[in-house]
Image (tube, rainbow, N blue to C red):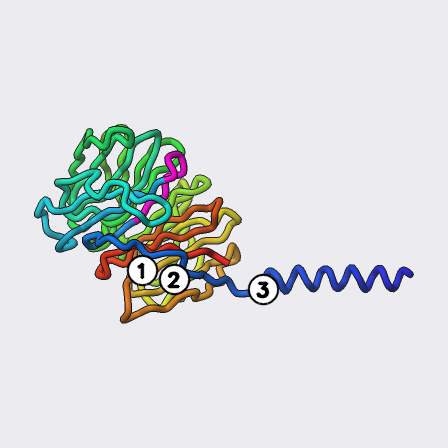
Amino acid sequence: MKKFNLLLMLCALLGVQLAFSQDKKIEVLWESKEQLPTPESVLYYAKDNVLFVSLIDGSGSEKDGKGGIAQLNTDGTIKNAAWVTGLNAPKGLAIHKGLLYIADITDVIVVDVVTGNVIDEIAVEGATFLNDVTVDNNGIVYISDTRENKIFQLRNGKVSLYLDNVPSVNGLKAEGGKLLALTGKEFWSIDANKKVTVFTKGFDQGGDGLEPVGNGDYIVTCWVGLVYYVKANGEIQKMLDVQGKMNTADLGYNQKEEVLYIPTFNSNSVVAYKLK
């Protein structure tokens, strides 16, 4: 009897190990049908169950006033195609206490989530290509400049240089007292003392979007058309390769429903995927 129980226990442990070793997959749920002019970033906002989508609508570095923010419902239908207008080339998005922060070339745009009104435009001195933005629990905003290889910090209304020599830095995420950053083909973890640890590396192309799964794992996109699953131990697994067919820019993620929302950039749409 003891041997039988031991065998059952071993089988159970083996089953758990196999479950954890299985590759992750994503399956298409929908693609938005209405044209979204050059969508670069999607942010899922759980409070209102809505998607914010940054629309470049032209050159990613030209101050032409054509950019804006659209609102999508979580089934891919348009809620408000022109929720915010008059921006230039808006990219990364982050929300904190009812304020939406937008990286827009050389400025951080602040929008009231309730009204959609722009309440502040903060110039970032020395910036040339602001790309992503994240906010920590204390309301401190971090903004990446991919061309200048810098991370800026917005604190109490004032901008300062937070970290220099961050190669091709793009995707950012403040999590657990650390700042996570995609730097070229590497994934960095930066602690409160600005000590850098390479959490993992080996992406085929430079990273773009970064979202926590909620269990210590992460999802990473590369603009050229790659989506990766990154485990808490740093192991990376390619879930999607659509290079040459569509782009996979800065994703949004619904942790509760395990749904990814990926802006396709040049294909002018957003695609939702279920994580399996």
Label 1: element kind: loop
Residue identified by numbered label 1:
248
Identify the residue at image location x=16%, y=44%.
Answer: 106
Q: Which mark is residue 227?
A: 2
Q: Amino acid at mark 3?
A: Ser
Which of discs 1 and 3 lies nearer the camera? The answer is: 1
Identify the residue at image location x=91%, y=61%.
Answer: 1
Mark 1 and mark 2: Cα distance apart in space: 7 Å
Establish if 31 lies above or below 85. below
Coordinates of residue 159 in the picture (x, y in percent): 22, 36
Extent of the magenta region: 42-49
Q: Are marks 3 and 2 in contact (CB under 8 Å)?
A: no
Please tell me how crowded label 2 is: few (under 14), some (14-19), or many (20+) other residues with Cα within 10 Å.
Answer: many
Residue identified by numbered label 3:
21
Mark 3 and mark 2: Cα distance apart in space: 18 Å
Side of 230 relative to 110 (left or right): right
Q: Are marks 1 and 2 in contact (CB under 8 Å)?
A: yes
**N-terminal-most mark, 1 or 3:** 3
Q: Amino acid at mark 2?
A: Val
